[in-house]
Image (cartoon, grey):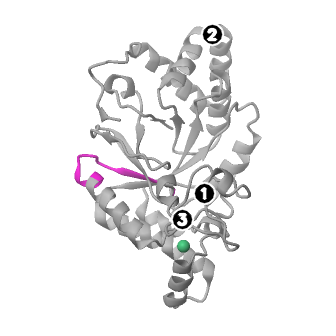
């Protein structure tokens, strides 16, 4: 099982212990970062999640009853964490494709696409989507929505000519119906799928079981699981790792922008006698191997310094 990390800042020494390194360069807020390509890292490009662009009324995705797909007071019912642009907005798609092409022509060897979907089942009913559906010749609304997303990913794959991976919304049962993301149809374009399973504590892990059992059964591509490593305590993350390691997933990616929590987990694994004993006696070999790898990794890296000269970030 592979180990990965999603970070805000690339540091050669810090990251050498990970098989997969994700670095967001275009975020769901709309913020774009310039980061120099790095050997085993994948830039993460948010596609239709873009709060800044979604504030433009002609671009935002709209529900059947006219609510905009925006966070906060603009749409209290659907509780979006960021704004969503209509996946059929041609002007936006052209700008996004130009951005992706620019990223692809730099030295990144592969790309990761985030938020490649409709916001939810009752979106998007903007006049543009209604017209395009009518002109599509397709009889079924849900088939048409899925074709919009699949064709977009196919277009990106052809344009960038580099391996792609994709984030999926963590609903293995109704992905196609709710978001237009059809795992089977997207499989030819994706090396693997990333499933974010975030929790602030990981006190309870039964829901990781529920979702991963289904994703592993249903996904035609390898599944990576993204665990949230900002607020959860190190022990909670270990518990989550053990829960994920039960399943034949391809790997675990920690969302740890400053790489501090992963360091804390590694130190716990090395320095806490009780934890060491628990891990050593754990019946799951995959979990033991992951834990041992993390513990070894922290031994090999020095403490971070804010002005470290090996930083590869070009600017904020
Ligand atoms: Zn629309």
User: If you read the primary sequence from the N terminus, does the residue marked by circle 2 or circle 1 appear first?
Assistant: 1
Splitting the image into 4 quarters, where does residue 151 fall? bottom left
Q: Which residue is mark 1?
A: 70
39 vs 86, left or right, is left
Name the residue located 53 percent from the left edge and 34 percent from the top edge.
254
Query: Nearest the camera: 36 or 189?
Result: 36
On the image, the x and y values in percent for residue 224 come to 53, 46
User: If you read the primary sequence from the N terminus, does the residue marked by circle 1 or circle 3 appear first?
Assistant: 3
Q: Which residue is mark 2?
A: 272
Please, is residue 50 above or below residue 258 in the view? below
- In magenta, the rendered stretch is 103-115
Name the residue located 53 percent from the left edge and 36 percent from the top edge.
255
- Within the displayed image, which quadrant is ligand 1 positioned in? bottom right
Whether residue 301 is in magenta: the answer is no
Query: Nearest the camera: 297 or 96?
Result: 96
Whether residue 104 is in magenta: the answer is yes
Secondary structure of residue under mark 1: loop
User: If you read the primary sequence from the N terminus, does the residue marked by circle 2 or circle 3 appear first?
Assistant: 3
Residues under numbered marks 1 and 3 in contact, where contact means CB atoms less than 8 Å apart? yes
Secondary structure of residue under mark 3: loop
Q: Which residue is mark 3?
A: 60
75 vs 148, left or right, is right
Name the residue located 65 percent from the left edge and 69 percent from the top edge.
63
Name the residue located 66 percent from the left edge and 15 percent from the top edge.
275
């Amino acid at each position: 099982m592979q180990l990965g990390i999603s970070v805000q800042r690339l540091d050669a020494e810090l990251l050498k212990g990970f098989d997969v390194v994700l670095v967001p360069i275009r975020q769901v807020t709309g913020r774009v970062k310039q980061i120099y390509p790095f050997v085993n890292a994948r830039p993460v490009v948010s596609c239709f999640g873009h709060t800044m662009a979604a504030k433009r009324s002609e671009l935002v995705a709209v529900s059947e009853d006219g609510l905009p797909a925006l966070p906060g007071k603009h749409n209290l019912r659907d509780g979006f964490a960021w704004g969503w642009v209509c996946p059929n907005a041609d002007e936006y798609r052209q700008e996004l494709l130009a951005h992706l092409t620019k990223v692809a022509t730099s030295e990144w060897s592969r790309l990761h696409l985030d938020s490649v979907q409709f916001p939810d089942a009752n979106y998007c009913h903007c006049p543009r989507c209604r017209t395009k559906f009518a002109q599509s010749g397709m009889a079924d609304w849900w088939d048409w929505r899925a074709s919009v997303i699949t064709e977009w990913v196919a277009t990106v794959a052809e344009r960038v000519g580099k391996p792609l991976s994709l984030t999926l919304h963590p609903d293995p049962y109704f992905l196609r119906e709710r978001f237009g993301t059809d795992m089977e149809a997207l499989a030819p374009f994706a090396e693997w799928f990333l499933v974010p399973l975030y929790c602030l504590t990981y006190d309870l892990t039964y829901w990781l079981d529920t979702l991963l059992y289904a994703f592993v059964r249903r996904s035609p591509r390898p599944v990576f699981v993204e665990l949230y490593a900002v607020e959860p305590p190190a022990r909670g993350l270990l518990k989550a790792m053990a829960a994920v390691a039960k399943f034949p997933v391809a790997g675990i990616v920690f969302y740890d922008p400053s790489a501090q929590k992963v360091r804390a987990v590694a130190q716990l694994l090395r320095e806490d006698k009780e934890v060491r004993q628990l891990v050593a006696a754990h019946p799951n070999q995959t979990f033991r191997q992951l834990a041992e790898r993390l513990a070894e990794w922290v031994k090999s890296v020095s403490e971070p310094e804010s002005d470290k000269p090996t930083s590869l970030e070009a600017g904020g």
